[in-house]
Amino acid sequence: MKDDEEVQAKLMAGAREVIEGHGEAALAGGLSLEEAARAWIDAGFEDTEEIDEWLSARCFSPEGAKRLEMAGITPEQAALRTSAGRAAYEETIGYKVAAGDLGLDEARRIITTAFWDS
């Protein structure tokens, strides 16, 4: 049991460090650093490198990142910038999906087009 607690404490410390490195925006919804780290871990992200990749894609919501991941979209793909969606600002796919301004189907179309046009 003690080993499990140590692993969890190490994971929380790593998650806090990664989140802190991404600044205020990574504290989605005004969460504390501790709450944000717990939210990422509770969403099933147990690898700080993966948390870092999603935050680098400007997907600041662990729930949004999980939705993208479950849809087969990688952090690298989520980092593509677009002005598509319900609101006409330019941002990453990850940001816009997490904000509810871009649907998963439209995100997939953008990613597919970017892949075939490259």
Image (spheres, helix red, strand yellow):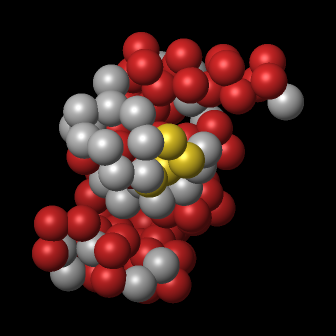
Q: Dividing the picture into quarters, in which one does residue 57 lie?
A: bottom right
How many numbered callouts?
0
Q: Which of 5 and 13 is in front in this view?
A: 13
Query: Farthest front residue?
Result: 88
Q: Residue at x 43, y 19 (%)?
A: 106
Q: Is residue 94 visible?
A: no
- Measured along the vertical axis of the image, is residue 3 above or below residue 81? below
Q: Which of 117 and 10 is in front in this view?
A: 117
Percent across and percent down for residue 1 are 41, 62
Query: Farthest right residue?
Result: 118
Q: Quadrant of the C terminus?
A: top right
Q: Can residue 15 be seen in this view?
A: yes
Q: Is residue 59 left or right of residue 74?
A: left
Q: Which residue is drawn at 28% across and 74% down?
A: 27
Q: Which of 70 and 113 is in front in this view?
A: 113
Q: Dividing the picture into quarters, in which one does residue 48 lie?
A: bottom right
Percent across and percent down for residue 101 are 26, 38
Q: Is residue 29 left or right of residue 76?
A: left
Query: Farthest left residue?
Result: 30
Q: Nearer the viewer, residue 51 or 101?
A: 101
Q: In this view, does 56 lie to the left or right of 101?
A: right
Percent across and percent down for residue 4 are 46, 62
Percent across and percent down for residue 18 are 52, 76
Q: Residue at x 50, y 42 (%)?
A: 82
